Image (cartoon, grey):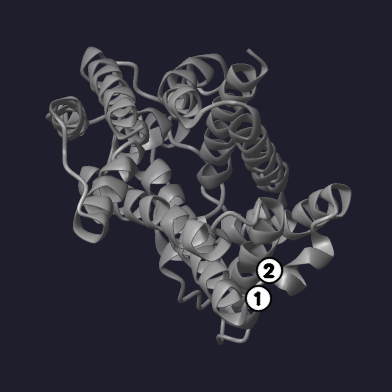
């Protein structure tokens, strides 16, 4: 029972991180969010590594394992998270969920190719639902009557001040309300790229850690590598100016997102330590239900709750659970 509770709390924490990130990208950019969430993750995991006694156990890992963990950190926390933030900004948190659930498909494909595993009927049904879910959500844009400029301006989120000469693609992108004016091409492109990164990095982490039990230490190495790349990126001309151009009001949102992700990982490791994977993995997919629920509570005016979107979420959630059951 306790393992199931930890698994549900993990899914809930991941969902809350998505909700807070949604508010963060409204007044900033994906890159700005990365700097806050990734760098804040380093001290959080350092504290956790100290508390669990794993901080100095990283010295026991081979150079190959450390390199694999560093690569996984860059793939997951930089590429995956950046693409996830761009997806959320383009189509909203609700529409992003069915796309995120496809990360399991990448794990299955790798397992089939590398481990010669077979796809069962249950897994096939799950994959089909994961493919159909995002397709159902696409809605044809309605022709709207022109409205006065003042009314149009008041209905859009306030755009953050932009630095002069800003060269960052994030800084130049206009603000939009993803609920009423989604950018499907951008959202689906970055959503699928994010799912690919999130689906591949766990395999790299598993390969590096094997059965060492050093999950917290591995997470710390991954976060340090990702944060190091971000700090080095500050040397790019104009990068610091781009980051200064965004409002500091969004910092608490991204900070809350970082803490929520940290707690989600801790709950996940705790659940796997005392409960079977066959129980933890399906329960972890409850995030696809928690996100629209929390969105309705906190971000009701920022998200779409149309029948097509909710149907797509439901089908994708069911598909993720079936696929997880088929794997385990």
Residues at circles 2 and 1 in contact by the CB criterion of under 8 Å: yes
Q: Residues within 10 Å of mark 1 (few under 14, many from 20)?
A: some
**In the picture provided, is 261 more to the left or to the right than 206?**
right
Residue at the spot 83% in from the left edge and 48% down from the top edge: 52
Residue at the spot 43% in from the left edge and 26% down from the top edge: 278
Tell me the quarter of the image containing the N terminus: top right
Tell me the quarter of the image containing the C terminus: top left
Residue at the spot 57% in from the left edge and 21% down from the top edge: 8
Image position of 196 with respect to 154: above or below: below
Query: Can you tell which quarter of the image residue 80 is in?
Result: bottom left
Image position of 260 with respect to 207: above or below: above
Q: Which residue is mark 2?
A: 224
Foreground residue, 293 or 72? 72
Q: Position of residue 292 (x, y in %)?
A: 43, 20
Foreground residue, 232 or 115? 115
Disc assigned to residue 268? none
Q: Secondary structure at mark 2?
A: helix
Q: Position of residue 260 (x, y in %)?
A: 66, 37
Q: Position of residue 143 (x, y in %)?
A: 13, 28
Q: Position of residue 19 (x, y in %)?
A: 54, 31
Image position of 159 with respect to 137: above or below: below
Q: Nearer the viewer, mark 2 or mark 1?
A: 2
Q: Which residue is mark 1?
A: 228
* Residue 264 in sight: yes
**In the picture provided, is 125 more to the left or to the right than 25?**
left
Q: Residues within 10 Å of mark 2 (few under 14, many from 20)?
A: many
Query: Can you tell which quarter of the image residue 173 is in?
Result: bottom left
Foreground residue, 99 or 52? 52
Foreground residue, 301 or 263? 263
Q: Secondary structure at mark 1?
A: helix
Query: Can you tell which quarter of the image residue 120 is in?
Result: top left
């Amino acid at each position: 029972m306790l393992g199931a509770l930890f698994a549900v709390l993990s899914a809930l924490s991941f969902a809350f991180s998505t909700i807070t990130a949604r508010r963060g990208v409204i007044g900033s950019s994906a890159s700005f969010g990365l700097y806050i969430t990734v760098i804040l993750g380093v001290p959080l995991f350092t504290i956790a590594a100290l508390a669990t006694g794993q901080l100095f156990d990283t010295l026991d890992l081979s150079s190959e394992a450390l390199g694999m963990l560093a690569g996984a950190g860059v793939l997951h926390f930089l590429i995956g998270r950046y693409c996830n933030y761009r997806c959320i900004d383009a189509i909203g948190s609700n529409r992003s969920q069915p796309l995120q659930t496809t990360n399991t498909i990448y794990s299955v494909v790798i397992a089939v190719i590398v481990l010669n595993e077979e796809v069962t009927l249950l897994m096939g049904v799950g994959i089909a639902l994961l493919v159909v879910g995002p397709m159902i959500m696409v809605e044809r844009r309605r022709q709207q009557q022109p409205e006065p400029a003042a009314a149009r301006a008041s209905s859009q989120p306030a755009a953050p001040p932009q630095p002069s000469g800003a060269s960052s693609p994030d800084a130049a992108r206009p603000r939009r309300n993803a609920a009423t004016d989604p950018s499907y091409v951008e959202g689906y492109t970055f959503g699928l790229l994010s799912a690919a990164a999130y689906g591949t990095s766990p395999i790299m982490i598993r390969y590096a850690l094997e059965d060492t039990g050093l999950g917290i230490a591995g997470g710390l190495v991954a976060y340090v590598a990702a944060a190091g790349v971000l700090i080095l990126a500050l040397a790019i001309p104009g990068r610091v100016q781009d980051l200064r151009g965004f409002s500091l009001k969004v910092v608490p949102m991204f900070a809350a997102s970082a803490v929520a992700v940290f707690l989600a990982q801790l709950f996940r490791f705790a659940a796997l330590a005392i409960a079977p994977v066959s129980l933890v993995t399906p329960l972890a997919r409850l995030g696809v239900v928690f996100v629209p629920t929390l969105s309705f509570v906190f971000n009701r005016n920022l998200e779409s709750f149309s029948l097509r979107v909710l149907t797509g979420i439901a089908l994708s959630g069911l598909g993720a659970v079936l696929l997880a059951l088929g794997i385990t």
